[in-house]
Image (cartoon, rainbow, N blue to C red):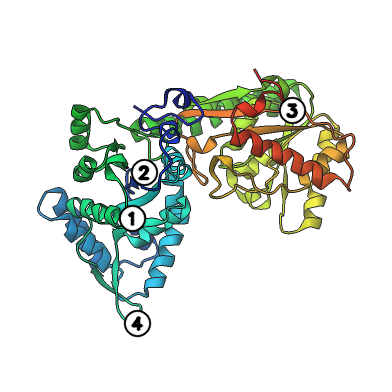
C-alpha cells in the first residue's frame, strides 16, 4: 500500500503506515520512531551523490575510484562484506579536517540530496514529532551523509557510522567500531533504547533493506518502506504494512518516457501557437494558445492531476493579480493551467538568461526583476502595470523565491511588488494556495512525478481601500489566510470563505 497524506482518507481510516495512524497513537517519549536513510527517507543512495560530487570536483583520484568500484562489484557478487565497502568509503576522506568533511556533506545535501527526501516520509517524521515520540535516524551511512538529513528534518538523535578523528581534528580514514550495519545496527538501537527508556514493543521502524529484518523483529510496529525482495516476502507473510513511494527518484523507464514526452510537447504546441498567431494576425492569440494548452499538456503527460477547490474564483474577477505560494519549478505550470490565458508574470532577473524560461518570459511580456535592487525592480514592474491596465492578469509568487525547508505549512515573508501592482491598477488580488506541490517535484527538480496536487483558489480581494499606510497589514492578512488554510486543510475553507466546490 501507499500511505495517504494525513489530510486525506488516511485521517478517517488511520491506515497503518500513514501520518494519520501516528497522529492517533499515544503521545509518549518512550515510543521510538527509527528511520533508515537510503531508500527510506531518501530516494536512492546518499553515497552515490557524494561520489558523483567528488568526481565532478576531481577530489577522487583514479586509484581510489577504481578501488571503490571494485569493492562495490565484489559486494554485489557476495565476495565482500558491507563493512569493507563502508570502510573503503571512509578511507576516501583520509587526511582531511573533520569539519571540512562535514561542511562538504552539508553542501552536497543542499545541492543533491534535499530534493530526494520523500515528502511522505517527511510527513511521517513530523507526525511522530507531534506526538512527542523519540525520533531517531538509524543508518549505516557516515555522518557526512546522515547528519544533514537529520538537521533538515529536525531529528535530534542519529545512530550511524562515524569517522575516527585524531587529536588534530584530522580524519584518519578509519571508522569507529563496530561498523553499524545489519545485526550491529539492531544492537545499536537496542542500546539506545535501553539508555533512553524506549519501549521497543510500542516503537516503529521504517526501513527498506533486507538486512534490516533483525530490527523489524524487535519493534512492535515494523514498517517496511520501499522494501527489498527478502523484506517484502517476510512482510507479506507476517502481515506487516508495506509502504511504497514513487514521488522521488528517476521514476524508472516509464518516468523517463513521461518526462521526455512532456518536454517534447513544447514543439508541436508552439508550432500550433505560431500558426494561430499568424492566421489571426494577433500575437496575443498565439500566446494564449500556448499558455492555455502547454501547461495542461505537461501536467497530463507527467501524470499530475490538480484537485482544485474554489475554481469559480478563477473567473469571478478578470483581470486580476493571481498570487501563489512558491515551492518548486513547476508551481507556475499549475497556476498557468488554471488561469489559462490573457496573463503575464513576474520572475527573478536570473531567469532572463535561461534559454527556455527567458524566451517564454519575453514572449509573455513578463517582467524580470532584480530583487536586490528595489529601484530597478519598481521600474521593471511598470510595463506589467501597463499590461494589466490593458486587460492582462498577472501571475506572481509574493514570496519572491522558492522557500527552502518549509514543506507544506511554511509561507515566507511577502514582498510588496505584487500588491503595488494591484494598487496601481485597481485589480483585485486572488490568492491561490498550493498545498502539496512538493509531492510531485522537489525544490530544484527539473522533472515531475505522477501525483495529485491540492489547490484552493480563494475569493478575490478588493484593494479599493488599500493605502501605503495599511499595505503591510493587508499583506499580512492575506499571508495569514495561506497559513491558516495550509495548517487546517481543507477545514479552514468552511465558514470564513464558504466551502469551495
* Location of residue 236 in the rendering, given as x and y in whole percent from the top left corner: 22, 28
Q: Residue beneath label 3, please?
A: 342
**Badge 3 local density, few (<14 within 10 Å), some, or many (20+)?**
many
Secondary structure beneath label 1: loop
Evaluate whether residue 52 shows in this view.
no
Q: Residue beneath label 1, please?
A: 196
Cβ atoms under marks 4 and 2 closer than 8 Å: no
Residue 88 versus residue 179: which sits nearer the camera? 179
**Badge 2 local density, few (<14 within 10 Å), some, or many (20+)?**
many
Depth check, mark 1 against mark 4: the one in front is 1
In the image, residue 219 sits, relative to residue 461, either above or below, namely: below
How far is mark 4 from mark 3, CA to CA? 64 Å
Q: Residue beneath label 2, please?
A: 43
How far is mark 4 from mark 2, CA to CA? 36 Å
How far is mark 3 from mark 1, CA to CA? 60 Å
Picture quadrant where residue 389 is located: top right
Amino acid at each position: 500500500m501507499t500511505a495517504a497524506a494525513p489530510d486525506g482518507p488516511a485521517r478517517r481510516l488511520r491506515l497503518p503506515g500513514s501520518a494519520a495512524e501516528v497522529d492517533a497513537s499515544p503521545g509518549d517519549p518512550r515510543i521510538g520512531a527509527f528511520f533508515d536513510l537510503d531508500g527510506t527517507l531518501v530516494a536512492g543512495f546518499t553515497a552515490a551523490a557524494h561520489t558523483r560530487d567528488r568526481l565532478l570536483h576531481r577530489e577522487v583520484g583514479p586509484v581510489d575510484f577504481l578501488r571503490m568500484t571494485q569493492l562495490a562489484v565484489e559486494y554485489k557478487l557476495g565476495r565482500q562484506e558491507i563493512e569493507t565497502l563502508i570502510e573503503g568509503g571512509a578511507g576516501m576522506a583520509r587526511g582531511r579536517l573533520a569539519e571540512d568533511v562535514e561542511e562538504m556533506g552539508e553542501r552536497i545535501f543542499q545541492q543533491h540530496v534535499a530534493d530526494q527526501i520523500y515528502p511522505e516520509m517527511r510527513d511521517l517524521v513530523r507526525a511522530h514529532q507531534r506526538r512527542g515520540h523519540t525520533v531517531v535516524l538509524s543508518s549505516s551511512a557516515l555522518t557526512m551523509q546522515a547528519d544533514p538529513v537529520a538537521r533538515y528534518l529536525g531529528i535530534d538523535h542519529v545512530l550511524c557510522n562515524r569517522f575516527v578523528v585524531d587529536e588534530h581534528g584530522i580524519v584518519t580514514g578509519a571508522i569507529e567500531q563496530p561498523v553499524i550495519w545489519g545485526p550491529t545496527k539492531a544492537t545499536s538501537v537496542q542500546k539506545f533504547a535501553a539508555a533512553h527508556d524506549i519501549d521497543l514493543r510500542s516503537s516503529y521502524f521504517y526501513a527498506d533493506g533486507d538486512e534490516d529484518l533483525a530490527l523489524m523483529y524487535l519493534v512492535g510496529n515494523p514498517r517496511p518502506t520501499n522494501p527489498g525482495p527478502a523484506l517484502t516476502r517476510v512482510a507479506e507473510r507476517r502481515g506487516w504494512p508495506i509502504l511504497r513511494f514513487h514521488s522521488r527518484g528517476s521514476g524508472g523507464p516509464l518516468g523517463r518516457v513521461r518526462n521526455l514526452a512532456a518536454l517534447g510537447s513544447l514543439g508541436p504546441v508552439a508550432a500550433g501557437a505560431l500558426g494561430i498567431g499568424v492566421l489571426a494576425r494577433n500575437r496575443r492569440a498565439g500566446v494564449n494558445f500556448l499558455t492555455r494548452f502547454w501547461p495542461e499538456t505537461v501536467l497530463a503527460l507527467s501524470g499530475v492531476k490538480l484537485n482544485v477547490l474554489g475554481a469559480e474564483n478563477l473567473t469571478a474577477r478578470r483581470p486580476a493579480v493571481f498570487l501563489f505560494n512558491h515551492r518548486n519549478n513547476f508551481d507556475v505550470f499549475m497556476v498557468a493551467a488554471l488561469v489559462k490565458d490573457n496573463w503575464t508574470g513576474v520572475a527573478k532577473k536570473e531567469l532572463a538568461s535561461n534559454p527556455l524560461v527567458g524566451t517564454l518570459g519575453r514572449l509573455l511580456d513578463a517582467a524580470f526583476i532584480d530583487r536586490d535592487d528595489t529601484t530597478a525592480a519598481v521600474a521593471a514592474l511598470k510595463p506589467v502595470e501597463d499590461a494589466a491596465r490593458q486587460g492582462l492578469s498577472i501571475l506572481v509568487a509574493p514570496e519572491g523565491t522558492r522557500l527552502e525547508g518549509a514543506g507544506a505549512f511554511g509561507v515566507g515573508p511577502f514582498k510588496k511588488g505584487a500588491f503595488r501592482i494591484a494598487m496601481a491598477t485597481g485589480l483585485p488580488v486572488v490568492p491561490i494556495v498550493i498545498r502539496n506541490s512538493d509531492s510531485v517535484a522537489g525544490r530544484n527538480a527539473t522533472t515531475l512525478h505522477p501525483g495529485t496536487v491540492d489547490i484552493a483558489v480563494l475569493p478575490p480581494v478588493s484593494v479599493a481601500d488599500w493605502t501605503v499606510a495599511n499595505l503591510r497589514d493587508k499583506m499580512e492578512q492575506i499571508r495569514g489566510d495561506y497559513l491558516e488554510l495550509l495548517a487546517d486543510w481543507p477545514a479552514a475553507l468552511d465558514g470564513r470563505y464558504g466551502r469551495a466546490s
